[in-house]
Image (spheres, rainbow, N blue to C red):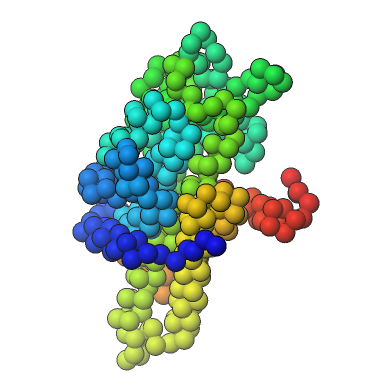
């Protein structure tokens, strides 16, 4: 039976990453986010220390660990106030897919660059008309000699402006049936015909969202990741780590919000006692703390199942972890704001910026309704509702 308690090595990793994050802090992150900057400095230092490649196989220069180790890094940086959303897509989705399914040539070319954190790769699946139905993706790839030519449009693609390449989810014709089937392609962002533009968002974050257009983008034959016939399996091999990482991202954010709230409740005095002495303040924060710890535990379970190779059980747990983390983060941030009163929306305290970010957790990368659909169908055996 798979255990999902964390090892001493994992706990030491958490402590080291937390210490690094604290040297920057939430104020540093917010200043960058409000000025249009990026957390490049944090990324480079974390990469140099090997924190961003703990899941890359050791034979390619990585740490040789699993998604649980990378999720721990993601959570601790978020808890320290310097969340790195690019971690969710570059080392978690893209490096994982390439390590599991890439050709030897792709592994040798790309994984050492992931190991040094020199390579940043975005992930492009979402389309304006497909919604949550990945079977409706219209980005297509066609053969032209030995090359592939990609055409399509993607939206809400994170951090394309920082990426060297994008792992694009497209579709190609099945020679046996004539139907379109999914396929994954590595597309450098400087490829002719590949363009992107920012999508204006009311979010305060250093990693921004983009619309991507592929206008007859030509890539070589070896841009196709793995087999033409295994792309659906490859896709879900990347989506489970995505959910685990997103859960860690938001449990880290929730921990930061609760830390700010608890400190304020301990030190803010009204009517001669700290406000934290009142159950009207203490109990909601305690409830939020319980919810965050439950979400963290489910996230660790999901990571342990994934790293043990149990993709089916990991899919269920990863969806549950993402759902639990989103709800916990929203409650924690909301209660932290309430604890601060008017100060909860003052820029000085940094909580107002977390409201929109936490709310996004209920929407992306999969909505809570689709998670509930998954649990109803696959965990409870109920009829499919969509």
What is the x, y in percent for residue 290? 49, 74
Say which residue appears at 44% left-offset and 20% top-offset.
222
Which is nearer the eye, 336 or 103?
103
Q: Is residue 45 above or below residue 141?
A: below
**Whether residue 119 can be seen here:** yes
What is the x, y in percent for residue 36? 30, 42
What is the x, y in percent for residue 196? 42, 28
The answer to whether 291 appears left or right of 33 in the picture is right
Say which residue appears at 41% left-offset and 75% top-offset.
339
What is the x, y in percent for residue 176? 69, 19
Quadrant holding the N terminus: bottom right
Say which residue appears at 66% left-offset and 52% top-offset.
374
The answer to whether 338 appears left or right of 81 in the picture is right
- Number of labels in the image equals 0
Quadrant holding the C terminus: top right
Q: Is residue 240 above or below residue 335?
A: above
The answer to whether 308 appears left or right of 189 in the picture is right
**Whether residue 27 can be seen here:** no
Q: Quarter-wise, where is residue 324 in the image?
A: bottom right
């Amino acid at each position: 039976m798979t255990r999902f308690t964390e090892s001493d090595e994992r706990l030491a990793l958490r402590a080291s990453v937390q210490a690094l994050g604290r040297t920057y802090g939430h104020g540093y992150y917010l200043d960058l986010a409000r000025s249009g900057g990026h957390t490049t400095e944090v990324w480079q230092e974390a990469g140099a220390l090997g924190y961003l490649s703990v899941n890359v196989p050791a034979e390619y220069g990585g740490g040789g660990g699993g998604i649980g180790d990378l999720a721990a890094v993601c959570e601790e940086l978020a808890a320290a106030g310097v969340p790195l959303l690019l971690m969710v897509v570059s080392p978690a989705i893209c490096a994982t897919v390439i390590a599991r399914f890439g050709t030897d040539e792709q592994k040798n070319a790309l994984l050492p660059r992931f190991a040094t954190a020199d390579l940043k790769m975005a992930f492009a699946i979402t389309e304006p008309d497909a919604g949550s139905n990945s079977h409706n993706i219209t980005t297509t790839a066609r053969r032209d000699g030995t090359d592939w030519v990609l055409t399509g449009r993607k939206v809400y693609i994170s951090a394309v402006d920082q990426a060297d390449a994008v792992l694009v989810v497209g579709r190609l014709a099945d020679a046996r049936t004539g139907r379109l089937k999914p396929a994954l392609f590595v597309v450098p962002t400087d490829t002719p015909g590949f363009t992107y533009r920012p999508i204006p968002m009311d979010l305060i974050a250093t990693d921004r969202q983009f619309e991507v257009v592929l206008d007859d983008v030509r890539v070589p034959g070896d841009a196709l990741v793995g087999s033409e016939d295994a792309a659906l399996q490859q896709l879900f091999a990347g989506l489970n780590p995505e959910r685990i990482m997103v859960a860690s991202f938001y449990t880290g954010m929730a921990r930061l919000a609760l830390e700010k709230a608890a400190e304020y409740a301990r030190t803010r005095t009204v009517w001669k006692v700290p406000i934290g002495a009142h159950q009207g303040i203490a109990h909601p924060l305690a409830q939020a703390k319980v919810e965050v710890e439950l979400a963290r535990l489910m996230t660790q379970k999901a990571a342990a199942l994934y790293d043990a190779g149990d993709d089916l059980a990991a899919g269920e747990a990863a969806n549950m972890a993402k759902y639990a983390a989103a709800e916990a983060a929203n409650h924690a941030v909301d209660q932290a704001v309430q604890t601060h009163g008017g100060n909860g929306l003052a820029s000085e305290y940094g909580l107002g910026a977390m409201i929109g970010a936490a709310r996004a957790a209920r929407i992306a990368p999969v909505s809570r309704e689709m998670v509930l659909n998954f649990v109803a169908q696959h965990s409870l055996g109920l009829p499919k509702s969509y």
